[in-house]
Amino acid sequence: MIRADYHMHSSYSGDSDAKQESMILSAINKGITHICFTDHQDFDFPVDEECPAGYFEFNTDQYFFDVAMLKAKYDELISINIGVELGMQEHLAESNDVYVGQYDFDFVIASSHLCHGKDPYKASFYEGRTEKEAYHEYFQSIYDNVKLFQNFDVYGHLDYALRYGPTKNQNFVFDEYKEEIDKILHILIDNGKGIEVNTSGYAKGMNGPNPCKDIILEYKKLGGEILTIGSDAHKPADIAADYDKAEALIKECGFDHYYIFNQRKPEVMKF
């Protein structure tokens, strides 16, 4: 059984209003023994009516203080770690590295919520071209980012763009993107980085996690070892969502364990 949720958000993320304590209590009630808060730090995110300036940024000093207080309060019931979901953009490689180096995070997720400054969440990302062309650009942008920035532990929801494409993953054929994805996975593996199995894909209409089974299988085939598991919960009810389905899939891919991180160091967890 999966006992860790290593991707969750609180009111420190612009797209969540969940109190951290409510997330902790939900995790405890669901039998989760290890959690890590990974709130959004997406510098230079495009500003519009939906996302005002600083929408995906937070006060990191206050964040550490608040989590530390809750960590002490619930120490005997659950292990609580402090992480961040860091938004990747090529021009931010140096400043992201400086930011991560300033804080003692337990865990850093690198995520591509933008592709060359454009948001795959928005329909405009796909306008004027085929869905396949948009996905190719997205995977290429991840490759460009991982060549420049290595101060993270796992890459989050590697096929994130598929959540929001016109047909989501309905027409996604792994072999059509294998070249770009393999380049990404080789860099991650060669540098001791892992990938995240993000279970929110099930609720997003993907009939599977992000990344999809084919990418997890390819990661395993190429020698990848480090998998973390997270619900990407933005509210208490979504913590550990679809973990039963994810566990079965991960085992099908040949993994009998997953990882958590403490002080940026991976630790094995058995199912």
Image: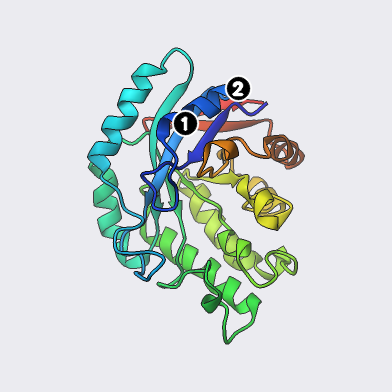
Q: Amino acid at mark 1?
A: Ser
Q: Quadrant of the C terminus?
A: top right
Residue pictured at 43% horizontal, 51% vertical: 110
Quadrant in which the N terminus appears: top right
Kindly identify which residue carries mark 1. Answer: 22
Q: Residue at x 70, y 35 (%)?
A: 247
Going by the image, does 78 lie left or right of 246? left
> Gap in Å between the C-alphas at discs 2 and 1?
15 Å
User: What residue is shown with label 2?
Assistant: 31
- Within the image, what quadrant is residue 259 found in? top right
First along the sequence among labels 2 and 1 = 1
40 vs 237: above or below:
below
> How far across and how far down the image is residue 108, in percent?
40, 43
The kind of secondary structure element at disc 2 is loop
Q: Is residue 53 left or right of residue 188?
A: left
Residue situated in front as seen by the camera: 142 or 111? 111
